[in-house]
């Protein structure tokens, strides 16, 4: 990653057991590079915890604490309190992270409490849009129409029937000074946002989009391409909320979005939208909702909200 202008040091070691093309593995490299050596990491149970620490081995080259599914933010709160008592609050970065199952769902109350209390740490969600570690079950992050093992598509079901939870604005409503969405397809943008979050005092949040070849059903070499398509189609807009005000990074023109079906057709979890017959009504609903969401983001940025 040195050719991209990122630090050469690797704090997430090679040789871990993540699937080929794992988006979360790329996310870990970015998170740890942004954190640097003076950092303490805490993580929930999840894919990365499982693949990085098969006893007696570890892929972590930084202090790392594994907690239960629900409590990386609680552990980070305790670490922050200890560092403050030791007078080292400004010397060591504290980063908590987990998948979308831990962040959007099981651990959300703990995350909300930590942000309400104002602890000085950064929380990063590596968002692969389902509970991948435990069998590809739907989460609050799973998009509308996606087929999972607990929202299976079939004659009586379109897949998941609910829209993806708006975690960004929920977290921003807690008064966080910095909230950002990022993608592993845009590594320099993601690295900048992670660094900004870590260097901003107070509880900060980055939602880092990280496609999963296994759960989304695509070939591993397509991970970055699909992550890029998610941005180009407006499925995953990249933006920041800085002290309550929106800054849109990309895309920034609703009229220039790629058709959403370009993204949907790359993944087996949406195969039922096209076969055995094309479901135009559902595809149009997704397309229109994406345009509405991006239009609202652009309007808030334009009006200074």
Image (cartoon, rainbow, N blue to C red):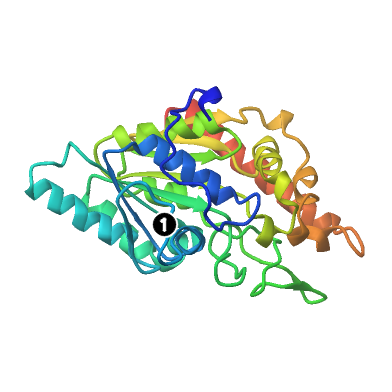
Viewer can see residue 242? no
Residue at the spot x=85%, y=59% of the render?
Answer: 279
Q: Residue 108: where, in percent of width, then height?
A: 38, 62
Q: Taking 182 as reference, is 218 above or below it?
A: below
- Label 1: how many Cα within 10 Å (few below 14, some 14–19, many 20+): some
Seen as rendered, the residue at the extreme right is 277
Q: Residue 156: where, in percent of width, then height?
A: 78, 77
Q: Residue 84: where, in percent of width, then height?
A: 11, 46
Which residue position is annotated with label 1?
58
Q: Give 45 or 302, whichever is nearer the viewer.
A: 45
Q: Give 45 or 291, whichever is nearer the viewer.
A: 45
Quarter of the figure with residue 218: bottom right
Q: Give 288 or 34, whichever is nearer the viewer.
A: 34
Apparent side of residue 139 relative to residue 240 in the rendered image (left or right): right
Q: Residue 52: where, in percent of width, then height?
A: 47, 58
Label 1, secondary structure: give it. Answer: loop
Residue at the spot x=66%, y=37% of the render?
Answer: 228
């Amino acid at each position: 990653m040195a050719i991209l202008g990122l630090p050469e040091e690797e704090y997430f070691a090679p040789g871990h057991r993540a699937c080929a093309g794992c988006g979360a593995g790329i996310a870990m490299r970015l998170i740890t590079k942004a954190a640097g050596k003076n950092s303490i990491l805490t993580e929930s149970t999840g894919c990365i915890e499982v693949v990085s620490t098969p006893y007696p081995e570890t892929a972590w080259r930084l202090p790392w604490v594994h907690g239960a599914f629900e409590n990386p933010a609680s552990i980070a709160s305790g670490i922050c309190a200890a560092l403050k008592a030791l007078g080292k609050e400004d010397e060591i970065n504290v980063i908590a992270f987990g998948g979308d199952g831990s962040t959007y769902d099981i651990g959300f109350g703990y995350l909300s409490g930590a942000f309400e209390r104002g602890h000085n740490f950064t929380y990063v969600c590596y968002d692969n849009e389902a509970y991948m570690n435990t069998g590809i079950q739907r989460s609050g992050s799973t998009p509308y129409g996606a087929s999972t093992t607990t929202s299976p598509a079939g004659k009586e079901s379109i897949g998941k029937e609910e829209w993806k939870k708006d975690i960004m604005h929920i977290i921003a409503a807690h008064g966080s000074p910095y909230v950002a969405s990022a993608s592993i397809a845009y590594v320099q943008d993601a690295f900048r946002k992670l660094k900004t979050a870590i260097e901003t005092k107070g509880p900060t949040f980055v939602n880092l989009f990280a496609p999963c070849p296994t759960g989304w059903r695509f070939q591993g070499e397509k991970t970055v391409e699909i992550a890029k398509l998610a941005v180009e189609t407006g499925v995953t807009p990249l933006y920041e909320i800085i002290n309550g005000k929106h800054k849109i990074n990309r895309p920034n023109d609703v009229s220039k979005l790629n058709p959403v079906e370009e993204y949907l057709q790359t993944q087996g979890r949406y195969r039922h939208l096209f076969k055995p017959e094309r479901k135009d009504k559902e595809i149009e609903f997704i397309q229109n909702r994406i345009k509405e969401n991006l239009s609202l983001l652009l309007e808030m940025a334009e009006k200074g909200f």
